[in-house]
Image (spheres, rainbow, N blue to C red):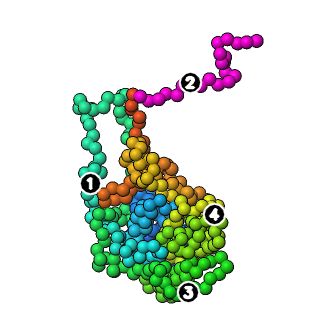
Amino acid sequence: MAAHMNSMEKLYNLSSNNATSFQKKTRSKLVSIPGTRPSVQNGQLIVSTGVTSLDYVIGGGLAVGTLLLIEEDQSDSYSQMLLRYFLAEGVVCGHELFLASAQDHPENIMQMLPSPILDDNVSTDQGDRPPTPLHLHDPDAMKIAWRYQNLPKFQTTFGSSLFGHCYDLSKPMEQQVRQAAKCHTFYLPEEKTAAKESSHLTGPYAGLLQCIQALIQKEGFDGSSSQCTVRNVLRVCLHSLGSALWGDDLCCSESPTHYHALTTFLYALRALLRSSLSVAMVTVPSHLIQKRVIMERITKLSDTTLTLESFQGSEKETNPLYKDYHGLLHIRQVPHLNCLLCAIPDTKDLAFKLKRKQFTIEKLHLPPDLSESVSRVSKVELPGCGPTSKHLDF
């Protein structure tokens, strides 16, 4: 009897310990790196571009292992500003930087990084404050139809996110903060090492690719043993590729000699990014490239492609409809990462404005034309829908 009771107690303990055969499925542990987070849409590790409104437009951020291509505006002022935002975000997050340029010295670009705003409550300018709402009993309130009074107002700004930081363009970043970041530079006029040229890759592009590849292998961004304890992200910034300063003739002739130089470089660069904890931002003067076929191939070799259309020097600069904006933003391409559908923005009508302290991207919202001299299109008579003249000849 005692032996029977002991066996029953053992069976009860086993059943209480293993009450069910189902086990809770745990998520796979992602790499924990400061300044990164997994994407809500596809689970990919993403970083911030430095502009919160731009992060919202491209799906929450820039995925690690991808390439962001920016087609420069004609003055190259706003595209270079996005580069500085991207570098400043890397400095604040503690990421390693790689900056390559053939025109401006990388040290001069680093000195122009905007200062981060670390306060939670960011003060706005006088011109940026929203207008004071008018009460219904106010005699100055605009009289509108009763059915439209309770409708929500059109929101031009995107929702704020806790991912990323805000920056003040009116103040440069402190020198101590910049020097604390680990930045690797590549200035083409000072590079003396001759790289091996291939059949489709010229000397400057070959040397730049070898420098990036050596840095990824040396610092362990490809998953080697040098980053076993602390892992980090490498931010690669390449300014104005395809210009004549890089020894490329894409912008000089309709039949360039180095036809496949830039496309071959981007193909090899994206292969390096896919196999490492790296992310790249590349700017290209697309308005100077004469053959559009080459520009289409460059776009296909990138993951995300944006075009900056500045109003400076164009007819839209004096157009009263665009008086609140400084240019338009066109989304050419968004990547499909770990999913069948890409992140589609709410609207494709996007514009950017440069305030005194901040660069923002908003929904393009044109004011209504309330002028009394609005031209009305005359009624067009369609053939076959009625008589075209009063008198018909049979």
Q: Position of residue 368 (x, y in %)?
A: 41, 36
Total marks in image: 4
Q: Position of residue 153 (x, y in %)?
A: 37, 41
Q: Which residues are magenta?
A: 373-394
Choose mark 2 or mark 3, whichever is in front: 3
Q: Callout 4, which amino acid?
A: Glu
CA gap, disc 2 and disc 4: 46 Å
Residue receiving disc 3: 194
Q: Callout 3, which amino acid?
A: Ala
Residue receiving disc 4: 254
Which residue is pictured at 47% across the width and 80% down the height?
A: 189
Q: Callout 1, which amino acid?
A: Asp
Which residue is pictured at 52% across the width and 64% down the height?
A: 285
Which mark sits nearer the N-terminus, 3 or 4?
3
Helix, strand or loop at label 2? It is loop
Quadrant housing the N terminus:
bottom right
In the rendered image, the vertical position of residue 96 relative to residue 73, given as above or below: below
Residue receiving disc 1: 125
